[in-house]
Amino acid sequence: MSADPLGIGLIGCGKISETYVATLAGSDEVRILRCADLDIERAQVVALAAGATPSTTAEVLADDRIGLVLNLTPPAEHADVALAALGAGKHVYGEKPLAASRVEARRVLDEAIPRGLVVGCAPDTFLGPSWQRARELIDSGALGTPVAARGTMLGPGPESWHPDPAFFYRAGGGPLLDMGPYYLTALVSLLGPVARVSAGARRTFEVRRVTGGPKIGDTLPVEVPTHVAAVLEHESGAITTLVTSFDCWDDVHSVELWGTDGTLLLPDPNGYEGVVRRRGRELNGKWETSGLEHEPYRRGLGVVETARAIRLGDAPRASGALAFHVLDVLLSILEAAQTASVVDVASRCERPTPLTTPAAVA
C-alpha cells in the first residue's frame, strides 16, 4: 500500500476496545494514534496495548494527524461524540447503534454530508466469510426466490459476565437494541431493506441481580423490554421473524433462511466464525457445508474497510445509511410492540455490495 495509514483517534476505552485494538494492529490501512476515556487509567491501558498516546477527547479532536475517530463510547454518547468529531473535520466510525434516536442519528448523517466526511458504523460481522458466502448463494439464485428468514437470539442476559451491565437495562438498551443490530444488519445485507414491522414485547423481571464480575450482588432496575418478538416485511417480499431475549435460560444464536429452491442455516451473526449449511433441490435434499469453523477475522474489519473506502473515494459497506435504516427498523419494532400495530418503516438503504475477499481488508 503506497498511502500512509489513516490516523485513528479512539474515544471510549471499554471492554470492546481491546478487540478493536487487536484487529487494527494487524492492518496497514490504519494506525491508532490516541486513546481517550473519562477513566484516564483505562485510557492508559488501552493506549499502551495500541502503541498510542493516552489522551483527552479534546486532544484527539485537535490532532491534525487523526483522520478518523473510532467512537466506542456507550450508546447514549454516540451522537454527541460523532458530532464533535465531524465538527472537527474527522471521519467517524462508531459502535452500534448509530445513535440513541432517529433524530440524533439523522443529525450525524446530515452533519457529515456537506463536509464531505464519511460515517461508518458497526456491526461489521456481515463482512465475514460465512455471511459473504450466504450472500453469494442468494445472489446466484441457489435458493431460488428468498421467501422467509428467522433470526433467534435467546439467552439469560449479560449480568453474569459483563463488568458493568447496568446500561443493558436502561433506556437505549435491551436485547433488541443491543443484539438486534447484528441480526438485522446481516439480514438486510442478504434480503434488502425492511418496509414494515409488527411486534410483541415483555419485561419479565422488574429487577435483575448481577451474578458475576466486579459488580456482583448489585441490583439493576429494568427500564426496557427484555423479550421482543417481531415480524419484518422486507421490500423484496421476504418475511423475517426476529426474536431477541435476555429472559431465557438457554442460549440460542442462529439465523435460518428459506427459499423456493433451498435452505440456509447460518451461524451467530455476532461473530465471524461458523459454517454455512445448505440443502436444496439441486442437492437432492442433502446438506452441503461451507465456511470456517473458527474466527479468522475480528471486530474492526469495518474500520479497515471504511478507511480503504475513504482512500479510494468509495462508500463504505458498513455505512451510516445502513446503520440508520437498521436503527429505524429496531425503533419501529419497539413502537409496534408498544402500540400493538403494524408500523411502516420510513427509511430505506441499499444492500451493501458483496465483499469477495474479506481477508483483503483485514
Image: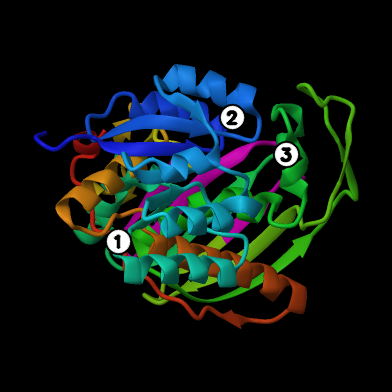
Q: Is residue 255 above or below residue 27?
A: below
Foreground mark, 3 or 2, reads 2
Going from N to C along the chain, the mark reached first, 3 or 2, is 2
Q: How is the image coloured?
A: rainbow
Q: Is residue 286 above or below residue 81?
A: above
Q: Residue at x 63, y 45 (%)?
A: 74
Mark identifier at residue 261: 1
Residue ID for mark 2: 15
Foreground mark, 1 or 2, reads 2
> Residue 149: x percent and y percent?
46, 60
| Kind of residue indicated by mark 3 | Gly
Q: Residue at x 77, y 58 (%)?
A: 225
Find residue 33 and report its image quarter: top left
Going from N to C along the chain, the mark reached first, 1 or 3, is 3
**Mark 1 touching mark 3, by CB under 8 A?**
no
Query: Do we see residue 20 in this rendering?
Result: no
CA separation in Å, label 3 and label 2: 17 Å
CA separation in Å, label 1 and label 2: 43 Å
Identify which residue, 123 or 287, lies in the foreground.
Answer: 123
Mark identifier at residue 79: none
Residue ID for mark 3: 157
Identify which residue, 175 or 66, lies in the foreground.
Answer: 66
Q: Secondary structure at mark 1?
A: loop
The stretch in magenta equals: 242-267
The overriding secondary structure of the stretch rendered in magenta is strand
